[in-house]
Amino acid sequence: AQTVTQSQPEMSVQEAETVTLSCTYDTSESNYYLFWYKQPPSRQMILVIRQEAYKQQNATENRFSVNFQKAAKSFSLKISDSQLGDTAMYFCAFPMNTGFQKLVFGTGTRLLVSP
Amino acid sequence: DAGVIQSPRHEVTEMGQEVTLRCKPISGHNSLFWYRQTMMRGLELLIYFNNNVPIDDSGMPEDRFSAKMPNASFSTLKIQPSEPRDSAVYFCASSLPGNEQFFGPGTRLTVL
């Protein structure tokens, strides 16, 4: 069965610093997507970044980038130049069916960015 | 685009009452998803639709829960009768096939 594990329940970082959130998953599929979602205190779920497994290049969206290690089944999120608005829960998500529609979410990492 | 729209944003009801949550997906998206988020169980997929047809409802917890999608722009999630353990945040999300899901703001349900 596909599983997603986020081993860091909480993390803290100061403004302008860099932080990395970890995520590991388990699958027997060879082609899939991986997602990071952000949930700020407003509770809105916001897509941060996505990675296609067939792409060797790591995805980047402005200050957010991933370190995708397919063989190790690892998908970490790096946030550079952290801002106060990055304070949120971050969820790693992985589709558990070949249609990429049934997402299974990790338990989340609560990130606190302090001044 | 207005994004995924959910109503109501907050619902407080008493045990035994019927609750109906509503969702309008993003125009053009033909996949719609209902999730439930609780502290204990995290974010769980309840049911999803493709082209208004329910594809997988294996996450629906009990027969008290039902979902419909009468057309491409509207879906409901109904709980009848509601129980205190149904208290949670319920999210609706929509997507194009095989693409990322866009979430609505959620409905916070409290059953007393």
Image: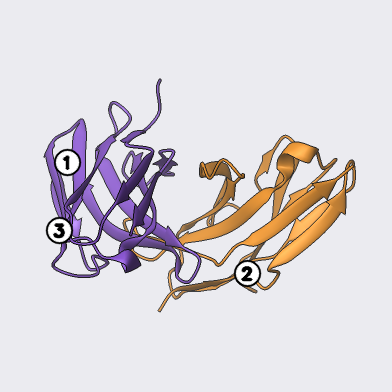
- Residue type highlighted by circle 3: Gln
Residue B47 picture quarter: bottom left
Q: What element carries label 3?
A: loop
Residue A35: give x, y in percent of width and height.
54, 52
Q: The purple chain is which one?
A: B
- Chain A shown in which color? orange
Q: Name the residue under label 3.
A: B80
- Judged left or right of residue B12, residue A14 is right
Q: Name the residue under label 1.
A: B51
Q: How many labels does the image show?
A: 3
Disc 1: CA contacts within 10 A as few (<14), some (14-19) or many (>=20): some
Mark 2 and mark 3, same subunit?
no
* Chain assignment, label 2: A
Q: Is mark 1 on a helix, strand or loop?
A: loop
- Residue type highlighted by circle 2: Gln
Spatial CA span between label 2 and label 1: 33 Å
Q: Name the residue under label 2.
A: A6
Q: Residue at x 48, y 71 (%)?
A: B40
Disc 3: CA contacts within 10 A as few (<14), some (14-19) or many (>=20): some
Spatial CA span between label 2 and label 3: 35 Å
Can you tell which of label 3 and label 1 is closer to the viewer?
Answer: 3
